[in-house]
Amino acid sequence: MWAYILRRVLYNIPVYLGIIFLLMAALRVNDPIWGYLGKNASHEAYAAMEKSMGLDQPLLVQFWDFTSGLVTFEEVDGVSRWKAGLAESWSDKGRPVGDLVGDAVWPSLSITVPALVLTSLISITIAILSAYYRGRLPDKVMMVSAVLGMSISFLVYIIFGQYWGAYVLNERIGGEFFAIQGYKSDEPGWWVTYCLLPVLISTIVTMGYDTRFYRAVMVEETGRDYITTARAKGATKRKIMFVHMLKNAMIPIITRIMITLPFLVMGSLLLEVYFGIPGMGRALLQAITTLDFPVAQLLVALFAGLFLLTVILTDVFYALVDPRVRLQ
């Protein structure tokens, strides 16, 4: 297994470097210096800022400086610090990129991890029940509800949730049960106030997609030979659905969950923007908008690394849950 993981890591290194190079080339289509200095800046000021930003170097040199910083550390005040995170943000002068990214991780995880857990548990349960009652009224009601849920725009749910779940509710209870904007993790009950409503919205939106996917998986499993064998042995329908079938459907379930893992760290962009949550998705949007290359490069490098890592781990989990899978 370790030999397989090592091979996959080595195979994906060129892919990872290619992603970073394409990003850096795409960012440099726009010149950020005039945006920071203004159109009336002198050529001397332009040249000075260009040198301070490192943009006077060829793209390959800039690429080497950034990628080498991803795997090296430097001593700062007696503490070993990640070199890639020591670069200063262009839009937030004097602030290391690593600190900016680190501060954005927890707000993103505060809404994405609970949303993933809730969505997965509810969707898998509904999918099993829907397959159990396949073709009957409960199945039809659940599937119609799932289709209706996924047919409505994410933005509609956000606006509806902010108005009825926060504005109207807060007026009726005479307090602030749900916050429409903001994020303060140092207050008592902060998660309920600032994160519960975005989590509920994310769960409702995603549940429709996941429920239909998991139901299709469960329905497909009902036609397998092991289901026929279990029925021939006299196993009850309940045991077949909730024991045998769920265990054998783990590979597509793992695939679905693992694909979403990189987005847990990057957060949900729309939720972070509309609810004022200072997560990584919002930080990436601001970095691209303000042409803050160091922040955008580090965030995309982290996201690409997480995505490639989950692809490798997905194959490993396949082998762990299904003995028929071999890592060769």
Image: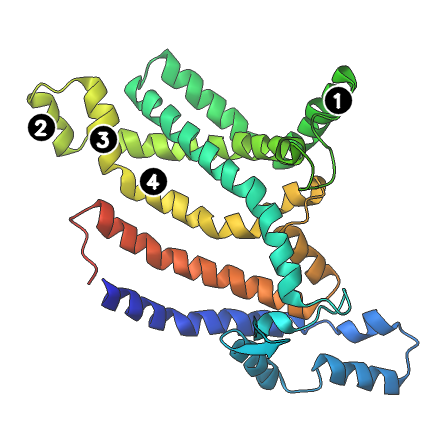
| Residue 175 picture quarter | top right
Residue at (50%, 42%) from the top-left corner? 113
Residue 149 seen: yes
Which amino acid type corresponds to the residue marked 1 in the rendered image?
Asn
For this view, does 76 lie left or right of residue 132? right
- Residue 53: horizontal and vertical position, in percent? 73, 79
Image mark for residue 253: 4
Mark 3 burial class by Cα count in 10 Å: few <14, some 14-19, many 20+: many
Mark 3 or mark 4: name the one nearer the start of the chain: 3
What is the CA distance from the residue labelled 3 to the residue labelled 4?
12 Å
Left/right of residue 288 with respect to residue 235 in the rendered view: right
Which residue type carries mark 3? Met
- The residue beneath circle 2 is 229
Pointer 3 or 1: first along the chain: 1
User: Spatial distance from mark 2 to mark 1, Cα to Cα?
Assistant: 56 Å
Residue matched to label 3:
245
